[in-house]
Image (spheres, rainbow, N blue to C red):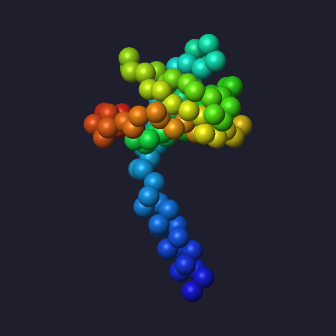
Protein backbone atom coordinates (compact mmCIF):
# COMPACT_ATOMS: atom_id res chain seq x y z
CA UNK A 1 0.00 0.00 0.00
CA UNK A 2 2.76 2.44 0.95
CA UNK A 3 4.65 1.85 -2.33
CA UNK A 4 1.44 2.34 -4.34
CA UNK A 5 0.80 5.64 -2.55
CA UNK A 6 4.36 6.81 -3.19
CA UNK A 7 4.08 5.84 -6.87
CA UNK A 8 0.80 7.76 -7.16
CA UNK A 9 2.29 10.82 -5.44
CA UNK A 10 5.23 10.77 -7.87
CA UNK A 11 2.93 10.54 -10.88
CA UNK A 12 0.78 13.39 -9.62
CA UNK A 13 3.81 15.63 -9.17
CA UNK A 14 5.15 14.80 -12.64
CA UNK A 15 1.74 15.34 -14.25
CA UNK A 16 1.68 18.97 -13.06
CA UNK A 17 5.24 19.78 -14.10
CA UNK A 18 5.99 21.11 -17.58
CA UNK A 19 7.85 18.78 -19.93
CA UNK A 20 11.59 19.45 -19.68
CA UNK A 21 13.86 19.18 -22.70
CA UNK A 22 17.40 18.02 -21.82
CA UNK A 23 19.74 20.14 -23.92
CA UNK A 24 23.21 21.69 -23.88
CA UNK A 25 22.69 25.21 -25.19
CA UNK A 26 25.39 27.90 -24.75
CA UNK A 27 23.77 31.20 -23.74
CA UNK A 28 24.66 34.58 -22.30
CA UNK A 29 23.31 35.42 -18.87
CA UNK A 30 22.73 39.13 -18.27
CA UNK A 31 22.83 39.65 -14.53
CA UNK A 32 24.06 42.24 -12.03
CA UNK A 33 25.39 44.51 -14.78
CA UNK A 34 27.46 41.74 -16.37
CA UNK A 35 27.19 39.45 -19.36
CA UNK A 36 28.38 35.95 -18.49
CA UNK A 37 28.60 32.69 -20.38
CA UNK A 38 26.29 29.91 -19.21
CA UNK A 39 24.72 26.74 -20.57
CA UNK A 40 21.09 25.68 -20.45
CA UNK A 41 21.06 22.08 -19.17
CA UNK A 42 17.30 21.65 -19.51
CA UNK A 43 14.42 23.92 -20.46
CA UNK A 44 10.64 23.92 -20.26
CA UNK A 45 7.92 26.36 -21.21
CA UNK A 46 8.19 28.01 -17.79
CA UNK A 47 11.89 27.89 -16.91
CA UNK A 48 15.36 26.46 -17.31
CA UNK A 49 18.23 24.90 -15.41
CA UNK A 50 21.51 26.71 -16.06
CA UNK A 51 25.11 25.72 -15.48
CA UNK A 52 27.26 28.79 -14.79
CA UNK A 53 30.62 29.49 -13.14
CA UNK A 54 29.06 32.05 -10.78
CA UNK A 55 25.34 31.47 -10.28
CA UNK A 56 22.91 34.24 -9.38
CA UNK A 57 21.24 34.21 -5.97
CA UNK A 58 17.63 33.18 -5.45
CA UNK A 59 15.42 36.18 -6.15
CA UNK A 60 17.83 37.82 -8.61
CA UNK A 61 16.34 39.11 -11.87
CA UNK A 62 18.27 38.23 -15.02
CA UNK A 63 18.09 37.79 -18.76
CA UNK A 64 19.08 34.77 -20.82
CA UNK A 65 20.13 35.46 -24.39
CA UNK A 66 20.43 32.94 -27.22
CA UNK A 67 19.96 33.09 -30.99
CA UNK A 68 19.09 36.78 -30.84
CA UNK A 69 16.32 36.16 -28.28
CA UNK A 70 16.25 37.60 -24.76
CA UNK A 71 14.13 35.88 -22.11
CA UNK A 72 13.70 37.53 -18.72
CA UNK A 73 13.45 35.52 -15.54
CA UNK A 74 14.16 35.18 -11.86
CA UNK A 75 16.50 32.77 -10.11
CA UNK A 76 14.48 30.47 -7.85
CA UNK A 77 17.21 28.15 -6.56
CA UNK A 78 20.97 27.50 -6.77
CA UNK A 79 23.12 24.49 -6.03
CA UNK A 80 26.87 24.65 -6.63
CA UNK A 81 27.21 25.85 -10.28
CA UNK A 82 23.54 25.22 -11.14
CA UNK A 83 20.64 27.66 -11.06
CA UNK A 84 16.92 27.22 -11.59
CA UNK A 85 15.34 30.07 -13.53
CA UNK A 86 11.59 30.81 -13.75
CA UNK A 87 10.75 32.76 -16.91
CA UNK A 88 8.78 35.99 -16.62
CA UNK A 89 6.64 34.86 -19.57
CA UNK A 90 6.17 31.27 -20.64
CA UNK A 91 7.73 30.20 -23.94
CA UNK A 92 5.31 28.92 -26.52
CA UNK A 93 5.49 25.33 -27.70
CA UNK A 94 6.90 26.32 -31.11
CA UNK A 95 9.87 28.04 -29.43
CA UNK A 96 10.60 24.94 -27.36
CA UNK A 97 10.21 22.67 -30.40
CA UNK A 98 12.68 24.83 -32.35
CA UNK A 99 15.31 24.17 -29.66
CA UNK A 100 14.78 20.41 -30.01
CA UNK A 101 15.27 20.47 -33.79
Q: Is residue 36 left or right of residue 40?
A: right
The answer to whether residue 37 shows anywhere in this view is no
Foreground: 42 or 92?
A: 92
**Above or below: residue 22 compared with residue 98:** below
Percent x, y for residue 57? 68, 31
**Above or below: residue 71 compared with residue 5:** above
Location of the N terminus by quadrant is bottom right
Q: Is residue 68 left or right of residue 86?
A: left
Q: Is residue 61 left or right of residue 17?
A: right
Number of dots carrying numbers: 0
Percent x, y for residue 85? 55, 36
The answer to whether residue 99 shows anywhere in this view is yes
Q: Quadrant of residue 95?
A: top left
Q: Residue at x 44, y 58 (%)?
A: 16
Residue extending furthest toward the left: 94
Percent x, y for residue 45? 40, 41
Residue extending furthest toward the right: 80
Q: Residue at x 48, y 27 (%)?
A: 72
Residue extending furthest toward the bottom: 1
Percent x, y for residue 81? 68, 33
Q: Residue at x 56, y 32 (%)?
A: 74
Q: Quadrant of residue 80?
A: top right
Location of the C terminus by quadrant is top left
Foreground: 4 or 32?
A: 32
Q: Residue at x 42, y 61 (%)?
A: 15
Amino acid sequence: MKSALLAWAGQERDARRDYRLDIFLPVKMLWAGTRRSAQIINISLSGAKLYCAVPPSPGDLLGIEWSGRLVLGRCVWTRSHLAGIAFEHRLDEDELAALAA
